[in-house]
Image: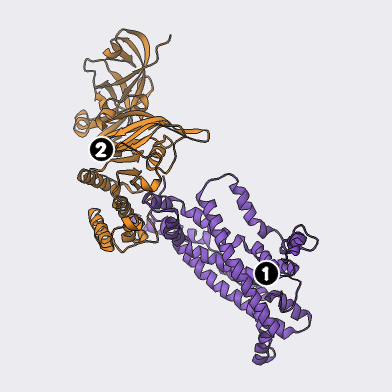
Amino acid sequence: MGIEVRNITKTFGTFTALRDVSLGVATGELVALLGPSGSGKTTLLRIIAGLEEPDPGSGAILFHDEEVARQRVGSRQVGFVFQHYALFRQMTVFENVAFGLRVRPKRQRPSRNLVKYKVLRLLKLVQLESMANRYPHQLSGGQRQRVALARALAIEPKVLLLDEPFGALDARVRQELRQWLRRLHDEIHLTSVFVTHDQDEALELADRVLVMNEGRIEQIGTPDEVFHRPATEFVVKFLGQVNFFHGRLEGDKVHFSTLAWDWPEHAGASAQPARVFVRPHELDVDVERNGHLALQAVVTRIHSAGPNVRLELRAASGEPLCAELTQERFRSLNLSVGNTVYVTPRDVTVFADEAPK
Amino acid sequence: MVGTATIKRTENVRCRAAAATTESRWVRWLLIGVSLTFLGLFLAMPLAAVFAQAFSRGWAMYVRSLGDSDALSAIRLTLLVALIAVPVNTVFGVAAAWAIAKFQFFGKSVLITLIDLPYSVSPVISGLVLVLLFGRQGWLGPWLEARGIHVVFAVSGIVLATLFVTFPFVARELIPLMQAQGTEEEEAARLLGASGWQTFRRVTLPNIKWGLLYGVILCNARAMGEFGAVSVVSGHIRGETNTMPLHVEVLYNEYNTTAAFAVASLLALLALVTLVLKSVLQWKTGEQLAPEEQGYTGD
């Protein structure tokens, strides 16, 4: 196990940032901590790094099966990348990357030539060889973040922790850097954890995603599992736009609005209230009834710029809906605002309410 | 046709926008005129008067006034006091600013208020407090006197008074600067394995050097120019406990105007040098903060 966190709790005054959180990151794995602001993801990362202390008496932190909770920040050998880079503004790019090597005690300090060799190799890795003598304020945001990464890697860390590494960058650079980081990770296979509030970033980049809310872990799983088999309502809502219906479990079906869907998981329930979620791309739209049970709705808005077409609809009962179609499907339906359509789901996610006792 | 109409309208808008932030020429000249007259009357003219008086009886007299043994002793004492007060308050100021800007602790706002105390208390009161504490009838005076330590009417009292009056300067200068710079760079240094001292010397100190120098220069100017507090504890013993500002007063009261203004001209010169250094450093500290702002979009 690359990183193991056991039963960590953290409170700031009366605010509980983490409630009994445990997680394991396999050696060489890239894990995303995903959650809204205030969910405790950054606190968890800072506790792993040693920048915050967990509450006294709460659990353990292990790197490669070695307890580190009692070690000082500097001796944990953590590579840490800050959202705002935190580059040393008075030093050149070269000096920034060399810092971790130069502050070592004399006996462990590499020779001048070795420092130079290592730094230049790292700058090559992050494609900034030509920038060695620049100062941080002379670099773009993406370049600064790559310097921060090279600096973190210079101390040959046991684990790499990244706090919203792309949070301060504009959309295009963010996309590029994301793909670049994934390739880099595949090359060096360093056990890594990064924090993000951007679900696309987490789902695209990570081997596994850990969804957090209010100091608790909601779900840990591969991007596929988290997206297609969400464990809780929070996960469904956080991972993108979703249509919500109040429903009712009856036999092996769930009834919602004017629709019904096979749901054998709660077979035998009678009139048990449930909440039903349908993603926009899981809704099929047709201009006439096609024999199935369907939901009648009126088109209120069409967003057709993009790979898919998003339709805003208003159901006959008054509730707003959102559906997503491919461009081909949209063209074949020949829709415009004000048309009446019939909506059928292709897939749904159902959470039964607690049965009344 | 449509095109020209649009262009005209944007021009119109631009004119109005400019008008909103610029006063008419008449008002501008009036404001500038008032400021310049005020500056001339209350700053430039007095300064010129000091130098005019100092040289009113020629260079030879000026040099002789400064070469007088009491004057030399006052200059020496002023330098000595500054040499002690400035380094002590620099160390204290850096320590206090570091603690306030980079850590959270109980009683922080009390500490900030206490640092400001010398700003809000009249220097004469500061001097009187020292007399109350260390004078013949003071709380600690007799005890110290019995051990041969004299504070009031002695150099140590002048040093203490100056220390008290000048201690906010460095801390006050550094606290906002260090708060603006945050703690992330220090955290990064610690994570990379740097010790506390290495972090301070290689990361924190270079980041604050211009602000620190600025604070030191202001502190020095005040240490050399302080009159009120020092006047109370000094006793005005010529050649022994007279600093430059006190010596100026003594000479002036003896109607020795030329000599008084000769010594005063040195203090005025110090003020001018301080002002120049201050503007240079202000420009440097501004430069130091600026790069940080780039690329910060926050969340």
Q: Which mark is residue B226?
A: 1
**Marked residue chain, label 2:** A
Say what secondary structure mark 2 lies in: loop
- Where is residue A241 drawn, in percent x and y? 33, 31
Residue depicted at x 33% and y 28%: A219
**Marked residue chain, label 1:** B
Q: Please say if A156 is above or below B237.
A: above
- Where is residue B105 drawn, in percent x and y? 55, 45
- Which image quadrant: the C terminus of chain A? top left
> Is residue B45 visible from the viewing direction of this image?
no
Q: Please say if A47 is above or below A320.
A: below
Number of numbered discs on residues: 2
The three-letter amino acid code for the residue at tag 2 is Thr
The three-letter amino acid code for the residue at tag 1 is Glu
Chain appearing in orange on the rendered image = A
Give the side of residue A4 with respect to residue B167, left or right.
left
Q: Nearer the viewer, residue B275 or A246?
A: B275
Q: Nearer the viewer, residue A34 or B33?
A: A34
Which callout, 1 or 2, points to the residue nearer the camera? 2
Chain appearing in purple on the rendered image = B
Residue depicted at x 75% and y 74%: B236
Q: CA distance from mark 1 to mark 2?
A: 66 Å
Q: Which mark is residue A27?
A: 2
Say what secondary structure mark 1 lies in: loop
Residue depicted at x 58% and y 48%: B108
